[in-house]
Amino acid sequence: MRRVTMIYQLLVIQLTFTTVVKSSTTIQEFYHEERDALIPFRDSMNSSYNLHGNWTGPPCLNNMSRWTGITCSNSHITQLTLESINLTGTLPVRFLQNISFLSKLSFRNNAINGDLPTLTDLAELETVILSGNRFSGSIPSDYINLHNLTTLELQENEITGLIPRFDQETLTALNLSYNRLTGPIPESKIMERFNRSSFDHNAGLCGRPLEIPCDVSPAPSPSEEDGKKRLQVWSVVMIVAAIVIVPLLVVLCLLCCYRRVQGKQVKKEATGMFFLCFGSG
Ligand SMILES: *[C@@H]1O[C@H](CO)[C@@H](O)[C@H](O)[C@H]1NC(C)=O
Ligand SMILES: *[C@@H]1O[C@H](CO)[C@@H](O)[C@H](O)[C@H]1NC(C)=O
Ligand SMILES: *[C@@H]1O[C@H](CO)[C@@H](O)[C@H](O)[C@H]1NC(C)=O
Ligand SMILES: *[C@@H]1O[C@H](CO)[C@@H](O)[C@H](O)[C@H]1NC(C)=O
Ligand SMILES: *[C@@H]1O[C@H](CO)[C@@H](O)[C@H](O)[C@H]1NC(C)=O
Ligand SMILES: *[C@@H]1O[C@H](CO)[C@@H](O)[C@H](O)[C@H]1NC(C)=O
Ligand SMILES: *[C@@H]1O[C@H](CO)[C@@H](O)[C@H](O)[C@H]1NC(C)=O
Ligand SMILES: *[C@@H]1O[C@H](CO)[C@@H](O)[C@H](O)[C@H]1NC(C)=O
């Protein structure tokens, strides 16, 4: 009896081994590290599309994609485009790191929150569209090292911080409008290509082409900034004081006048009252 089960087990092991070998020879049409990178993304996001049901098996078969939103070339994933499907959640950290041949990334019009994705070493990346989400945090500085970048659309998010100095010759479309960016728009030959429509609706931005002048000292030292803050606090205090105290004084004065007028039983003539209050006060 024991021997029979042992033989059976060996048979099972033998069988699974051959199927693994077979599948690895027939399914060499995709790259495991690329698939492995997208599984945590699939499983951590919600959407109105059943990604979990569709993103199964290999993503690519040569130039053909089996997964919605994916484009393949020579068995590599080259595009990831999931637009307007109510994607919610936070992107897994560095999840695109191993999708080395990615040339286009678009999550336009979803509801993704958290930080913008890190795009380090994605040298082929040409188009990055992350507009119309709830991304926050600042623009990662590694975006300036994407040497093939032509389009960067980050408009309509909640992005804060400074704009990095983009200077890739390839960049021809940039939109950072409708965010919470602050500070000066960097001056460079490449940045001069873009008009105010690329930067509009960021309350804290200054510089060309917004026609909002930046402070004379572009990088104030912490102590200077402290001083400025103290100054601002003081001016606020003064304004509040003026707003509160001036009407209070007027009311007090009037009250005082009224009492005097009543106390002295003077004729209720307007001119007389005026002299009592302001002439002899
Ligand atoms: C990328 O691939 C390397 C080597 O296969 C692996 O160690 C790493 O965890 C992968 N990173 C991601 C984010 O998938
Ligand atoms: C995923 O969806 C696409 C488009 O609807 C379809 O062509 C493909 O066969 C689906 N893949 C799987 C694995 O179900
Ligand atoms: C896949 O497409 C590329 C061009 O995008 C082409 O060079 C290559 O031969 C194609 N491969 C197959 C297996 O069709
Ligand atoms: C996305 O969700 C909103 C409500 O949260 C809903 O009104 C809208 O129809 C959804 N869009 C899609 C494409 O499912
Ligand atoms: C996705 O939806 C499920 C069920 O509605 C919910 O339990 C889960 O927290 C959601 N996950 C995210 C990342 O929004
Ligand atoms: C990407 O840029 C490198 C130089 O940084 C260049 O050699 C390569 O041809 C570019 N790739 C594409 C697809 O333009
Ligand atoms: C600003 O640039 C965009 C894109 O290049 C262009 O479509 C638009 O007409 C420009 N607007 C103005 C006022 O020049
Ligand atoms: C930038 O995005 C805003 C909001 O979607 C749009 O109104 C504007 O025309 C865009 N500008 C450019 C230059 O693409």
Image: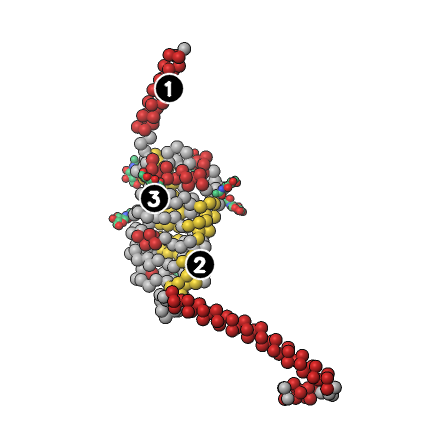
- Which residue is labeled 1 in the image? 12
Amino acid type, mark 3:
Gln
Q: Residues within 10 Å of mark 1 (few under 14, many from 20)?
A: few
Q: Residue at x 33, y 37 (%)?
A: 33
Q: Residue at x 34, y 35 (%)?
A: 32
Going from the N terminus, do you reach mark 1 or mark 3 first?
Answer: 1
Q: Residues within 10 Å of mark 2 (few under 14, many from 20)?
A: many
Q: Position of residue 47 (x, y in %)?
A: 48, 42
Q: Residue at x 69, y 81 (%)?
A: 258
Q: Residue furthest top?
A: 1
Q: Is residue 248 left or right of residue 82?
A: right
Q: Nearer the viewer, residue 69 or 254?
A: 254
Q: Is residue 182 left or right of residue 238?
A: left
Which disc number belongs to residue 21? Answer: none
- Which residue is labeled 3 in the image? 97
- Which residue is labeled 2 in the image? 180
Label 3, ligand 1: CB separation under 8 Å:
yes
Measured Cα–Cα span from mark 1 to mark 3 = 37 Å
Q: Secondary structure at mark 1?
A: helix
User: Does 191 appear above or below 106?
Assistant: below
Going from the N terminus, do you reach mark 3 or mark 2 first?
Answer: 3
- Pick the quarter of the image with the N terminus: top left
